Image (cartoon, rainbow, N blue to C red):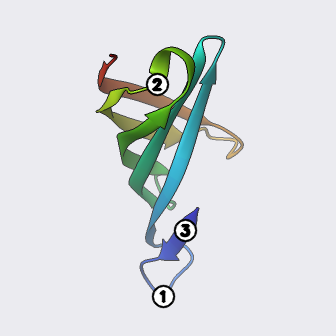
Amino acid sequence: MEVVLNSGTEAGPFYYTADLEINTKKGTLTTRSVGVFEGMPFGLGTQFDRVIGGTGIFEGAEGNLFLKFEAHETGGAFVSGVSGKIWLD
């Protein structure tokens, strides 16, 4: 994962890129992610994922996912929502 601080302060927003693997009992879905996160004062973020591979039922899959998330008040977890479409062969 690459994380780049976008401002000169720790509280500023940052953006990142990463490959994400989502493991299920029926296979693994691999996506390439691009996101932005505002750490202070809100702990809000959004992320776009493009499907780049998979195994099991996800082999040959295509599609996109959109995630939005908010840091839990304890700072130890995220609450997130996911939408998008995945096409399977």
Q: Nearer the viewer, mark 3 or mark 2?
A: 2
Check the image and report above or below for 31 versus 80: below
Residue at x 66% of width, y 11% of height: 25
Query: For the residue labelled by badge 3, is the local secondary structure a helix, a strand or a loop?
Result: strand
From the viewer's perspective, tell me whether residue 62 is left or right of residue 72: left
From the viewer's perspective, tell me whether residue 52 is left or right of residue 56: left
Q: State how far apart marks 1 and 3 are (Cα).
A: 17 Å
Q: Amino acid at mark 3?
A: Glu
| Nearest to the observer: residue 67 or residue 65 | 65
Task: From the top left corner, tell me how far across and down residue 45 is, in percent.
Answer: 41, 49
Upstream in sequence: badge 1 or badge 3: 3
Upstream in sequence: badge 3 or badge 2: 3
Task: From the top left corner, tell me how far across and down residue 78 is, in percent.
Answer: 58, 37
**Label ID, residue 39:** none
Residue at x 66% of width, y 38% of height: 77
Q: Amino acid at mark 1?
A: Gly
Determine the image quadrant of residue 74: top right
| Nearest to the observer: residue 47 or residue 20 | 20
Residue of label 2 = 59
- Number of numbered discs visible in the structure rendering: 3
| Nearest to the observer: residue 1 or residue 6 | 1
Check the image and report above or below for 86 versus 14: above
Q: Are marks 1 and 3 in contact (CB under 8 Å)?
A: no
Q: Residue furthest bottom?
A: 8
Q: Amino acid at mark 2?
A: Glu
Upstream in sequence: badge 2 or badge 1: 1
Query: For the residue labelled by badge 1, is the local secondary structure a helix, a strand or a loop?
Result: loop
Residue of label 3 = 2
Residue of label 1 = 8
